[in-house]
Amino acid sequence: MARLNVSRMIERIEYLATISATAENGVTRFSFTDQSERANDIVQQWMEEAGMKVHRDGVNNLIGRYEGTDPYSPVLMIGSHIDSVKEGGKYDGVLGVIAGIEVVTQLFEREIRPNRSIEVVAFCDEEGARFHTSLIGSRAMAGQLTDEDLQTADEQGITLSDAMRQVGLDPANYASAKRDPKTVHSYLELHIEQGPILQEENQPCGVVMGIAGALRYNFCILGMAGHAGTVPMSLRKDALTGTAEMMMAIEQIANQYPPLVATVGRLNVQPGVGNVIPGTVVGTLDIRDTDEQRKLQVASEMLSACEQICRQRGLESRFELVTQSPAVRCSPRLVALIENALIKRNIKPLKLQSGAGHDAMAIAGVCDVGMIFVRCKDGVSHHPDEYASPSDIETATEILFDVVLNECIQTSEVN
Ligand SMILES: [Zn+2]
């Protein structure tokens, strides 16, 4: 089988990187801006060149459709996003869209008609960099976007509604982006890993087992402030040393359940004075895991360990759950297809967990999802230094191509 046109892919990635609000320091391409519209226009052109019919849905998701022989068969979707964070990299999101277009281009150039239609989707606003609400395009497609989301404003005070109007969309129409699950068979996303495991394992790509869900707590530990010189150690109720012991316990528990991760990312010590025993500590605890049950069980183990530590030290503890996003499991069927494709090409079928959110997370509410991760240099992402090599991109896109053939070029349905 002929090779993919990797230099075309790289050229396109480089071209999109030039469409940025800033000339230096990486790519800044927020949604519903001149930059996002220019990026949509050029991606639309590439989709059309690959034989796709293109439309934009009610929230500006760009959808290219390559018609299959059976117009009633649920479609295979390949997608990712083309927005970026502030001063981000060239590959995050973009790679998955360009890879999808390349796969369809190959089919088109070889005059292969799939049974089911293929849709390549460039989702609008995955990052949440502008409105501080993420996965806007994919959540709209899954019917999870709300009126409340439309009222969130960017730093200039422009609401999502207003921003949609500025690119010619009617925000009242956002619900029209929702897709009937009966019309979508499966969803595939190729994405850079944004972590160091593939590099460490010396593998070009791997299969994603699931996307971690998060639990975020705000906590407050109350002790007793006092003079740092006069209160003997045995009579202290030091909120900070209590918190330190809690943090060590959290780390120890998390270590027992890899790949679960737990982070105390913010601490505020009061009164925060050098000669006063800390009376109050306010902080955050973030727990992520792809196993929903385990995440909840470990969270309760951590919280009771913290409570016990506080009790022993005469401290009062309060934990408030502020964010809860469920973990998403990738479809075992798609995981197996990706694994087989990896094995066929003599690549170790490394199983990865995604600690970061992706459009696949929302689309899991519509259909089966599968993800391929591509090695990125030093695991760096959301940074101008983000890099994936042409040969890794080629290998991963070949894997995607194999899976697409499996999903679309067959006479009987695989379930
Ligand atoms: Zn991304």
Image (cartoon, rainbow, N blue to C red):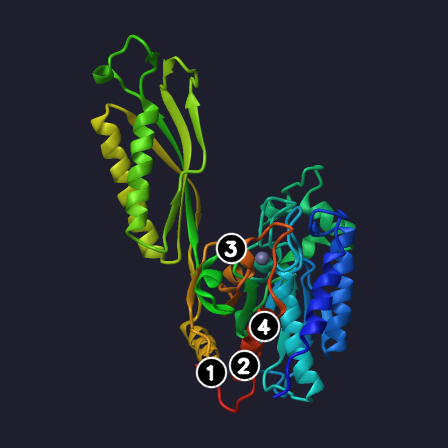
Task: Assess whether mark 2 and mark 4 are in contact (beta carbons under 8 angstroms).
Answer: no
> Residue 203's x, y, as percent?
48, 68
The residue at which mark 1 appears reads as: 344
Query: Does residue 180 appear left or right of residue 297 in this picture?
Result: right
**Foreground residue, 320 or 239?**
239
In this view of the protein, can residue 169 be seen by the observer?
no
**Foreground residue, 214 or 246?**
246
Which residue type carries mark 1?
Lys
Q: Is residue 17 above or below residue 235?
A: below
Query: Does residue 225 appear left or right of residue 94 in this picture?
Result: left
Which residue type carries mark 3?
Gly
The residue at which mark 2 appears reads as: 402
Name the N-terminal-most of marks 3 and 2: 3
Which residue type carries mark 2?
Asp
- Label 3 and label 1: CA atoms lie apart by 29 Å
Name the N-terminal-most of marks 3 and 1: 1
Name the N-terminal-most of marks 4 and 1: 4
Task: Assess whether mark 1 and mark 3 are in contact (beta carbons under 8 angstroms).
Answer: no
The residue at which mark 4 appears reads as: 77
> Residue 118's x, y, as percent?
62, 77
Q: Mark 2 and ligand 1: say if the CB distance to the nearest ligand atom is below 8 Å.
A: no
Residue shown at 61%/88% (left/top)? 1
Q: Mark 3 and ligand 1: say if the CB distance to the nearest ligand atom is below 8 Å.
A: no
Name the N-terminal-most of marks 1 and 2: 1
> Residue 91's x, y, as percent?
63, 60
> Residue 218's x, y, as percent?
41, 35
